[in-house]
């Protein structure tokens, strides 16, 4: 069904717009998470088209879904979480240093002391 | 010791070293012993393994294997050949001196070393991988180590630079995943060979999807190589990082992804069109980078912009090589000269960052308008022999392509081979401006009449050893340049065909050209001291690393490449 | 200048949309080779019936190693930043979430209800985490999933006050993490010496429990992930300045 993929594309684009357009750095990190979520959903959704049972070889399983996207997305989710943790720590550090969460204010204040 | 048992050693040996350091840190014991052991296992043993593998790669042996010895296409394919050997050698040549240099900075030692060795392993893995998703994972490991290392000196500016680079690079990696999705969907596999096999026989809508996916993958990888228009992040990251990290980033990490990509590009039939765009991008990058470097007044930012400019050389030759096809003589020589120049720049830029970094630390300022007589300051802080100043001089000669250094051969050979394409003119202009920019940087070492105040003394042992190693590489490379060039060409031959080509190029025949370039540059430097020139330079707009600019450049790169491929 | 920014952002998003949406909306049928191969061979090759575990701990174990490295590096980096931040603001804010009751002023958010329930739930969640870790090869689960559950169990124990256990001591946790990382690397290198190549199963034909390598990897990864995330969470709660 195409509606699901259109929604995933919209999720992707909204995450991307948040990263590029929003000035608050925490919202940028949200955007990155939305982006990651969209890609994970895309892989899993499309991989599930070829079957209708979970990819565990129990008795009576005949057509399971493609397990490759699921394994790849395990890795991608963990990497996404780690990068989010690091970026949030950096964001808190920036806030403590400049007192603001707005990227333009931060850049100006840091350039002034430079 | 045969090739099959040794070729994965540069991956797992640094990991073992890092694991030892993590354990030593957690148990709080014997850190000096752990550091030396880690240095031996993580850097010296892989160097020994590379030396043992030399006869095999000269004989054009290569290993294609699946990690874990699974007999199926589902496994991760790795491919070791001369290209991997050269990339790992490039990495070791820079990282051994950088690790020795970092011993002089006691703060953050343990964290730096742990992350350093993990980065070593990831660089080796990137050079060996022949699987798309594994390339993603390796690039992410390289990226995360870079983000942490850039932010490790805990200055506010470096935290912002790391944050910007993190968001830009992480977003690009998500686009990479979409590209991997597209390619897996239409080809059913994740290994380069199988992807290419299926992709080359696609048509219609499937071909468009495959081409767009390839574009996403190529541009997301090229982002790490900082070609214009993807270079906005580099200045902040490389100028604010600690000196050892800047040397490592500028020297190694902006070149490895480029050459790791070539394995995929060679198998795909539409790469000639990519090559032409890359050549122009390289030329524009070279000129834009050096113009922006000329207007800089902060030492490390000048060096960072110069990195953008010099990587333009590497990318231009790389692009021309792919366009000509690696089976042809021109292509084989061009790719060898591109990798050779990557070596030259890596060693020279590492030496520059380390020597200028130490000098500005002693001076207390990075501002070119204020810092003078660095040699005197260094002497006052305990340097008995002016090795730092001499090393800076050698690096200056190398990057300005003056004899008898490695850079003299590298740059002249590259520009000679690139003749015939428009970007060669851009590269020649850049050569002149590069000398001017570095003469501007050298004012730090000009003597001044001001008395030197008392400065803190520090020990220079580790710093001297590392700088001497790098200088020695530049000088020996200059002497043995032709054999080295031939060696590189031989090692890269299996990528194209198996005929032996030799360029027979002798850079000393172009001494006249070097002399003319030098004269122009000196003339421009004298002109540049005037206020008219200063005002003109100030008119060049500073590139801001705002998110909208970074991503606009990214979208532009995607569109240009997509237009070229989907046409 | 603001208009120029807006135009740049709009053009960027439009161009990226133009290039990404065709890939997302592609109608090519999803390839079935991998699924068919795994359906026939996953159990005999790796001993696991959970094909996803067979992939990421068997056929594509190198990716899992890379993922573990990303986790290690990012936790190290985050901890380095947070510990420095914690030192600067060591008194006011951090102590309100610290673990030792005597340092803590009365705080509305940490009620007796939270502490009692969390400390009782901790061991149960810990057991569940180990179950998920150990049974990863035959049911959904595995090292990463179990490790994260173990991490949350340790956070529960840290939030409670009745249990003063070694499990919430960051020193002990970081030692477990270091040792499990070392064992992971040694396990992956052991394949080199046993002729199944790097990261191959060194005891392939040996024992009766055929999924032994996967179980071992699950345990190691679970311990590593669990302890490192737990240390990071405890640091974020302000407990790292204890030692």
Image: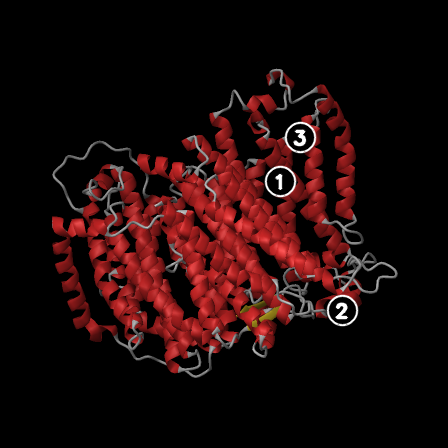
Circle 1 is placed at which residue position?
Answer: C228
Few, some or many C-alpha atoms within 10 Å of disc 3 (few <14, some 14-19, many ≥20)? many
User: Which secondary structure lies at badge 3?
Assistant: helix
- Judge left or right: residue C90 versus residue B90: right
User: Which secondary structure lies at badge 2?
Assistant: helix
Mark 2 or 3, nearer chain start:
2
Circle 2 is placed at which residue position?
Answer: C36
**Residue at the spot x=29%, y=35% of the render?**
B457
Q: Are marks 2 and 3 on the same chain?
A: yes
Q: In this view, does C15 lie above or below B566?
A: above
Chain letter of disc 1 in the image: C
Circle 3 is placed at which residue position?
Answer: C168
- Residue closer to the observer: C208 or C102: C102
Are the residues flagged by discs 2 and 1 in contact, CB closer than 8 Å? no
Mark 1 or 3, nearer chain start:
3
- Residue closer to the observer: C67 or B47: C67
- Judge left or right: residue B271 versus residue B69: left
Chain letter of disc 3 in the image: C
Number of on-image labels: 3
Are the residues flagged by discs 1 and 3 in contact, CB closer than 8 Å? no
């Amino acid at each position: 069904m195409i509606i699901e993929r259109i929604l995933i594309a919209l999720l992707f684009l909204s995450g991307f717009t948040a990263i590029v357009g929003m000035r608050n750095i925490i919202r940028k990190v949200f955007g990155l998470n939305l982006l990651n979520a969209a890609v994970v959903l895309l892989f899993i959704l499309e991989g599930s088209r070829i079957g209708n049972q979970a990819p565990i070889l129990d008795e009576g399983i005949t057509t399971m879904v493609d397990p490759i996207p699921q394994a790849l997305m395990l890795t991608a989710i963990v990497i996404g979480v780690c990068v989010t943790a690091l970026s949030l720590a950096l964001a808190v550090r920036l806030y403590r240093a400049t007192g603001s969460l707005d990227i333009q204010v931060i850049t100006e204040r840091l350039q002034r002391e430079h | 010791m045969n090739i099959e048992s040794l070729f994965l050693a540069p991956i797992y040996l640094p990991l073992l070293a890092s694991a030892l350091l993590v354990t030593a840190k957690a148990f709080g014991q014997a850190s000096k012993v752990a550091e030396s052991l880690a240095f031996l296992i993580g850097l010296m043993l892989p160097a020994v393994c590379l030396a043992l593998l030399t006869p095999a790669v000269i004989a054009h042996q290569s290993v294609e294997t699946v990690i874990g010895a699974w007999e199926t296409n589902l496994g991760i394919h790795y491919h070791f050949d001369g290209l991997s050997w050269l990339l790992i050698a490039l990495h070791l040549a820079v990282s051994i001196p950088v690790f020795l240099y970092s011993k002089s900075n006691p703060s953050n030692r343990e964290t730096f070393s742990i992350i350093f060795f993990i980065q070593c392993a990831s660089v080796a893995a990137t050079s060996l991988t022949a699987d798309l998703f594994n390339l993603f994972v390796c690039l992410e490991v390289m990226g995360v180590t870079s983000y942490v290392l850039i932010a490790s000196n805990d200055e506010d500016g470096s935290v912002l630079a790391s944050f910007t680079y993190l968001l830009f690079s992480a977003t690009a990696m998500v686009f990479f995943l979409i590209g991997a999705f597209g390619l897996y969907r239409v080809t059913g596999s994740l290994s380069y060979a199988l992807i290419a096999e299926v992709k080359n026989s696609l048509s219609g809508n499937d071909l468009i999807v495959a081409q767009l996916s390839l574009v996403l993958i190529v541009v997301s990888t090229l982002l790490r190589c900082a070609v214009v228009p993807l270079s906005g992040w580099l200045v902040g990251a490389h100028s604010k990082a600690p000196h050892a990290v800047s040397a490592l980033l500028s020297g190694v990490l902006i070149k490895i992804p480029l050459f790791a990509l070539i394995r995929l590009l060679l198998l795909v039939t539409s790469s000639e069109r990519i090559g032409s765009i890359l050549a122009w991008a390289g030329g524009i990058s070279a000129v834009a980078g050096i113009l922006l470097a000329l207007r800089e007044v902060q030492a490390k930012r000048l060096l960072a912009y110069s990195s953008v400019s010099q990587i333009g050389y590497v990318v231009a030759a790389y692009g021309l090589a792919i366009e000509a096809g690696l089976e042809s003589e021109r292509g084989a020589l061009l790719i060898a000269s591109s990798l050779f120049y990557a070596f030259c720049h890596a060693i020279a830029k590492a030496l520059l960052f380390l020597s200028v970094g130490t000098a500005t630390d002693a001076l207390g300022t990075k501002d070119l308008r204020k810092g003078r007589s660095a040699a005197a300051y260094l002497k006052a802080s305990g340097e008995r022999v002016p090795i730092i100043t001499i090393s800076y001089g050698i690096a200056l000669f190398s990057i300005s392509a003056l004899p008898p250094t490695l850079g003299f051969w590298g740059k002249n050979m590259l520009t000679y081979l690139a003749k015939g394409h428009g970007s060669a003119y851009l590269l020649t202009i850049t050569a002149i401006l590069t000398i001017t920019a570095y003469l501007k940087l050298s004012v730090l070492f000009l003597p001044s009449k001001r008395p030197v105040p008392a400065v803190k003394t520090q020990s220079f042992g580790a710093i001297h050893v590392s700088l001497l190693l790098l200088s020695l590489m530049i000088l020996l490379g200059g002497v043995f340049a032709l054999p080295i060039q031939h060696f590189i060409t031989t090692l890269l031959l299996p990528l194209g065909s198996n005929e032996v080509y030799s360029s027979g190029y002798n850079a000393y025949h172009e001494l006249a050209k070097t002399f003319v370039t030098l004269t122009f540059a000196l003339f421009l430097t004298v002109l540049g001291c005037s206020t008219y020139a200063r005002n003109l330079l100030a008119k060049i707009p500073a590139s801001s690393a705002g998110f909208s600019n970074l991503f606009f450049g990214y979208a532009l790169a995607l569109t240009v490449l997509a237009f070229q491929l989907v046409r | 200048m603001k208009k120029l920014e807006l135009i740049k952002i709009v053009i960027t998003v439009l161009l990226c949309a133009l290039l990404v949406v065709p890939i997302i909306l592609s109608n090519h049928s999803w390839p079935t080779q991998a699924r068919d191969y795994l359906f026939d061979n996953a159990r005999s090759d790796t001993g696991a019936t959970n094909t996803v575990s067979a992939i990421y701990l068997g056929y594509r174990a190198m990716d899992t190693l890379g993922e573990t490295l990303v986790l290690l590096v990012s936790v190290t980096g985050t901890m380095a930043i947070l510990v420095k931040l914690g030192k600067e603001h060591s008194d006011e804010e951090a102590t309100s979430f610290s673990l030792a009751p005597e340092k803590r002023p009365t705080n509305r958010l940490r009620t007796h209800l939270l502490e009692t329930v969390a400390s009782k739930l901790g061991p149960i969640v810990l057991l569940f985490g180990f179950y998920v870790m150990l049974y990863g090869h035959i049911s959904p689960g595995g090292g990463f999933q179990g490790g994260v559950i173990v991490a949350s169990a340790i956070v529960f124990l840290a939030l409670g006050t009745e249990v003063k256990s070694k499990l919430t001591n960051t020193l002990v946790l970081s030692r477990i993490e270091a040792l499990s990382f070392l064992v992971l690397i040694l396990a992956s290198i052991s394949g080199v010496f046993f002729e199944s190549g790097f990261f191959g199963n060194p005891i392939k034909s040996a024992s009766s429990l055929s999924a032994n390598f996967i179980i071992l990897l699950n345990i190691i990864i679970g311990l590593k992930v669990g302890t490192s995330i737990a240390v990071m969470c405890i640091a974020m709660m302000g407990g790292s300045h204890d030692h």
